[in-house]
């Protein structure tokens, strides 16, 4: 099955399941039978399955499908879970404080999950287009390497030209660019303003320096370009790495709140089955 | 610059799963050793020089730049010391810690708020409706788990097999009769009977709405909770202060119904006997009154509202009271004007075959020779209740005892002596003697009402004339140290009582004037006629008559009581109670006279309600008669004949049935309400009496 076929099959399955859930909701709403407990238990099991994806990643040796298959299942089941959630709360905000908190936590988990889905689909592509594809943990080392290379070029140029222009420019302007923390929003927005500003300064500097220094500046310009690309990759990988910091803890809180909700429902439902 | 170095010599191995990483990582000068598992910095030097061929050699790895140019110090130490750092946690470690903290914070919040004073507010699923607003945060009022805390709820969930039945809590304030949790508060037998009636009446079964058909096909609805319908199934609380917990979707109403339909206009069964399903407690023939009696009296009814007024809720059209609607014609009738029997015979000296008793050697003492009456029903019942087996005299005339058995003679003797005792006690000890006697089979309060101002003086004079020696007889008969009836009967049986002497005769003083005794009490009250004490009803709601009828309904010795009940409720009986008030059978099979026309506060809640006010737009009679069309040919009075077997579905009303089309002229979608609950009630139990009982008994929790 090709990727496209697989996606089409997934969409069709999701549509069918959603239609079935909505039909069941309508049928239960028609009768005196209480569909709340059924939808609630189904939703709770779905949440547990979704949380099970984290465990699956920690147990790669188990022959229970690949992590990518589990991830696709995680996405699909998450969407079905949202539908069950809406049916369970009858498409209206709960009235009680605790239920409101529970719904809020579910909403945050869902939104963070959708955010994760979007960033994991979009950001890798952006990183690939801009390059380079590097390990997140190694980016500081590469930055350090670039900075050392630039410093080396400037030292050599100053030695050869006996001019302090490049050294002064490095101290006053370039070092702050090299050592600054990458700016998140400009890189997410694909803004290259900082890079252009530095490049413009380099171009302006070229007109006032010797031929040796010009060659050094051309090489520095390339390294600045690489540094900006590394910043771009760093920002995008930072988001990819840290969005689960919201999703996973909230999921655990959701499971605990859901358990309490189940306890409360069974204690206060008055024997209603 | 090439970032990706594939060689293991050129590139270090990343370990993101470890707990700690070098604190200098951000600056790109990571120490090759890295922190310990406990997060301690292990930085010393870039390498550990090795002594090779007598000289110290740098051992820095190629990955970290290879051997340094400076080489080791002469003492063999590395010339490039590593600056120490403060190791920091890896991203994965941080995430794990955040997860643990999230779990801890969540549990902490639950414990903090779940066990505090705000737990009920926090865990409440929402405000209760305004009707239950007085309950506030007292969860235990409605939930058996309400008095528990977090631990109790957990325990219930984990270890309790028994589901709490909180419907009982609802019923403590909202009594719903004997079958509170069955459909419509009716037993399964009653529901089955209704279904059978519908099936018998036939008619096409309408097409159920699609959703209901799907529900019926997909779900086993009939087995819902084994026929027990908990209150919460329909009444959803905690939906906010302004919510209406009595609202229910039409389709949910129809879930259990065998005949499901779309709306009143589409599929709802035709009205079969609406609204005149029940025999009216008051016998009132509209046709005969409007076409015969009232014209004969020269009266004209100009409007339905002359006799029927809408109640305060705007729901029911109530009938006028007797005083405003009936008294003008019927008041004198009740007091006996023009009637053959004016008064109710209370006590009498019956005609007894004294000669036969004497010849058999049975002492009866003094007895008036010209006593000519028969035992009155009231007297029979009193003597019967005093322990005399008066039924044995059934079919036997007291004035001819020639063929009586010894046992019958003995009873006849007891009747004679007890009658004399009743008269004598009444004449000498007054009303208290009669109250004392009646208290034997009713309570004191009712006994007082049954005496109704009985005048001892009236009897005192008469008794002296009828039986001059009765005082001596009674003195001899009554055993001084015992006031029991057995002692009394024993005393005269043994011949202690005096010899028989004929009396003087019945009261005749007023007859000589040509005026009847009963006419002297035209406003009602007691009078003597012959050897009989009569009571003439004083008017409507005469408590003496009402109480004797009520007593005869419920008193033991049903044979005598039934005779008394029939005599007092006969159509022509004094007081004419039975002329308008019909007899009904209670569930226990006891015949009672229905005193009230219709009392909304005690009436059973009907399955169908009709709110009159919104239907009276102009307030004209035409509006009333658009629905209530009089049926002149109906044999209304046949319902009240003694052998009538009229049931709510077969009884004959004086009005024609209302047709569904009359309602669907307006009650169609978008024009007027068509929801089931617009016209129908789910709970049809006797809420009035149940609530009254609840109020008088107090809460079951008390």
Image (spheres, coloured by chain):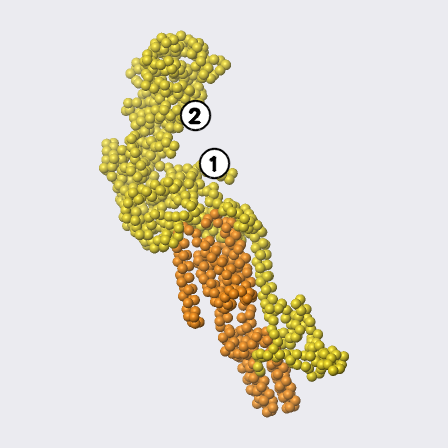
Chain colours: A orange, B yellow
Count residues near mark 2 (Cα–Cα under 10 Å), then give few for <14, some for 14-19, many for 20+.
Answer: some
**Parent chain of label 1:** B
Alpha-carbon span between mark 1 and mark 2 = 22 Å
Pick the residue in front: B520 or B358: B358
Pick the residue in front: B645 or B570: B645
Residue A262's x, y, as percent? 51, 53
In the rendered view, tell whether residue B304 sits above or below residue A191. Answer: above
Residue B4's x, y, as percent? 57, 79
Pick the residue in front: B479 or B167: B167
In the rendered view, tell whether residue A158 sits above or below residue B437. Answer: below
The residue indicated by pointer 2 is B442
Instruction: Answer with the quarter of the image where residue B401 lies.
Output: top left
Q: Secondary structure at mark 2?
A: loop
Q: Earlier in the sequence, mark 1 or mark 2?
A: 2
Count residues near mark 1 (Cα–Cα under 10 Å), then give few for <14, some for 14-19, many for 20+.
Answer: few
Instruction: Check the image and name the residue furthest to the bottom.
Output: A211
The residue indicated by pointer 1 is B697
Q: How many marks?
A: 2
Residue B49's x, y, as percent? 72, 78
Pick the residue in front: B17 or B113: B17
Instruction: Answer with the quarter of the image where residue B427 lies.
Output: top left
Image quadrant holding the N terminus of chain A, namely bottom left
Residue drawn at (53%, 78%) of the image = A131
Q: Position of B2 compared to B637: left or right? A: right
Residue A96's x, y, as percent? 50, 54
Residue B567 visible from this viewpoint: yes
Query: Which label number is shown at residue B578?
Result: none
Instruction: Answer with the quarter of the image where residue B588 lies.
Output: top left
């Amino acid at each position: 099955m090709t990727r496209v076929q697989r996606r089409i099959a997934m969409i069709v399955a999701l549509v069918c399941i959603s239609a079935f859930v909505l039909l069941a909701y309508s049928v239960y709403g028609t009768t005196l039978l209480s569909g709340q407990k059924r939808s609630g238990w189904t939703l709770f099991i779905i949440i547990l399955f979704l949380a099970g994806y984290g465990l699956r990643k920690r147990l790669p040796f188990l022959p229970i499908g690949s992590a990518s298959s589990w991830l696709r299942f995680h996405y699909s089941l998450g969407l079905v879970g949202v539908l069950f959630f809406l049916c369970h709360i009858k498409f209206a905000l709960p009235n009680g404080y605790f239920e409101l908190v529970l719904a809020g936590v579910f909403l945050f988990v869902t939104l963070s999950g959708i955010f994760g889905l979007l960033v994991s689909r979009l950001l890798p592509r952006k990183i690939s287009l801009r390059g380079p594809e590097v390990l997140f943990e190694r980016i500081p080392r590469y930055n350090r390497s670039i900075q050392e290379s630039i410093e080396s070029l400037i030292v050599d140029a100053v030695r050869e030209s006996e001019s302090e222009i490049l050294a002064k420019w490095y101290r006053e302007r370039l070092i702050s660019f090299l050592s600054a923390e990458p700016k998140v929003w400009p890189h997410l927005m694909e803004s290259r303003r900082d890079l252009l500003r530095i490049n413009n300064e380099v171009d302006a500097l070229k007109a006032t320096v010797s031929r040796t220094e010009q060659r050094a500046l051309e090489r520095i310009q390339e390294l600045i370009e690489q540094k900006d690309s590394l910043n771009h990759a760093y920002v995008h990988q930072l988001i990819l790495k840290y969005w689960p910091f919201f999703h996973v803890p909230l999921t655990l809180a959701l499971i605990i709140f859901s358990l309490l909700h189940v306890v409360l429902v069974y204690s206060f439902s008055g024997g209603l089955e | 610059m090439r970032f990706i170095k594939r060689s293991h010599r050129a590139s270090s191995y990343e370990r993101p799963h470890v707990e700690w990483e070098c604190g200098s990582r951000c600056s790109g000068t990571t120490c090759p050793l890295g922190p310990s598992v406990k997060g301690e910095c292990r930085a010393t030097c870039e390498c550990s020089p090795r002594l090779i061929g007598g000289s110290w050699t740098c051992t820095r790895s190629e990955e970290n730049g290879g051997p340094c140019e400076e080489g080791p110090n002469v003492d063999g130490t590395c010339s490039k010391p590593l600056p120490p750092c403060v190791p920091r946690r890896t991203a994965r470690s941080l995430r794990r810690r955040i997860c643990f903290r999230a779990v801890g914070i969540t549990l902490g919040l639950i414990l903090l708020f779940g066990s505090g004073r705000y737990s009920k507010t926090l865990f409440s699923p929402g405000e209760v409706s305004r009707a239950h607003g007085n309950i506030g945060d007292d969860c235990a009022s409605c939930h058996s788990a309400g008095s528990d805390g977090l631990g109790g709820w957990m325990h219930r969930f984990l270890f309790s097999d028994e589901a709490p039945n909180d419907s009982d809590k609802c019923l403590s304030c909202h009594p719903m009769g004997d079958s509170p949790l069955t459909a419509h508060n009716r037993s399964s037998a009653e529901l089955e009977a209704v279904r059978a009636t519908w099936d018998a009446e036939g008619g096409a079964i309408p097409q159920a709405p699609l959703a209901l058909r799907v529900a019926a096909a997909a779900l086993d609805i009939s087995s819902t909770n084994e026929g027990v319908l908990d209150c919460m199934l329909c009444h959803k609380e905690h939906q906010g202060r302004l919510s209406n917990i009595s609202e229910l979707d039409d389709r949910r109403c129809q879930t259990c119904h065998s005949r499901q339909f779309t709306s009143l206009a589409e599929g709802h069964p035709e009205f079969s006997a609406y609204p005149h399903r029940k025999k009216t407690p008051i016998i009132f023939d509209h046709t005969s009154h409007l076409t015969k009696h009232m014209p004969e009296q020269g009266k004209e009814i100009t409007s339905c509202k002359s006799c029927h007024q809408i109640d305060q809720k705007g729901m029911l059209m109530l009938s006028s009271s007797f005083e405003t609607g009936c008294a003008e014609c019927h008041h004198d009738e009740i007091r006996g004007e023009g009637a053959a029997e004016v008064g109710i015979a209370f006590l009498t000296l019956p005609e007894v075959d004294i000669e036969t008793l004497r010849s058999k050697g049975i002492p009866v003492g003094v007895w008036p020779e010209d006593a000519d009456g028969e035992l009155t029903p009231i007297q029979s019942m009193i003597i019967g209740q005093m322990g005399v087996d008066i039924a044995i005299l059934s079919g036997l005339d007291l004035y001819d005892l020639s063929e009586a058995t010894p046992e019958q003679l003995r009873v006849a003797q007891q009747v004679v002596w007890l009658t004399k005792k009743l008269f004598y006690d009444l004449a000498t000890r007054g009303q208290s003697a009669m109250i004392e006697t009646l208290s034997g089979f009713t309570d004191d309060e009712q006994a007082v009402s049954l005496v109704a101002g009985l005048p001892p003086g009236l009897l005192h004079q008469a008794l002296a004339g009828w039986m001059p020696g009765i005082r001596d007889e009674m003195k001899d008969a009554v055993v001084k140290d015992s006031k029991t009836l057995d002692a009394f009967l024993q005393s005269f049986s043994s011949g202690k009582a005096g010899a028989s002497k004929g009396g003087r005769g019945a009261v005749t003083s007023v007859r000589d004037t040509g005026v009847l005794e009963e006419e002297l009490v035209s406003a009602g009250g007691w009078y003597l006629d012959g050897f009989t004490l009569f009571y003439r009803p004083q008017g409507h709601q005469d408590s003496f008559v009402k109480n004797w009828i009520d007593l005869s309904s419920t008193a033991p010795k049903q044979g005598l009581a039934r005779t008394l009940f029939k005599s007092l409720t006969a159509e022509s009986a004094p007081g004419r109670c039975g002329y308008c008030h019909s007899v009904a059978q209670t569930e226990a099979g006891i015949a009672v006279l229905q005193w009230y026309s219709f009392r909304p506060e005690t009436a059973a809640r009907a399955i169908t309600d009709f709110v009159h006010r919104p239907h009276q737009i102009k307030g004209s009679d035409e509006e009333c008669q658009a629905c209530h069309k009089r049926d002149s040919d109906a044999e209304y009075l046949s319902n009240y004949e003694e052998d009538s077997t009229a049931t709510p579905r077969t009884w004959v009303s004086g009005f024609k049935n209302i047709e569904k089309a009359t309602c669907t002229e307006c009650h169609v979608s978008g024009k007027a309400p068509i929801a089931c609950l617009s016209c129908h009630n789910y709970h049809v139990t006797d809420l009035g009496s149940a609530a009254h009982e609840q109020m008088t008994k107090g809460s079951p929790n008390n």
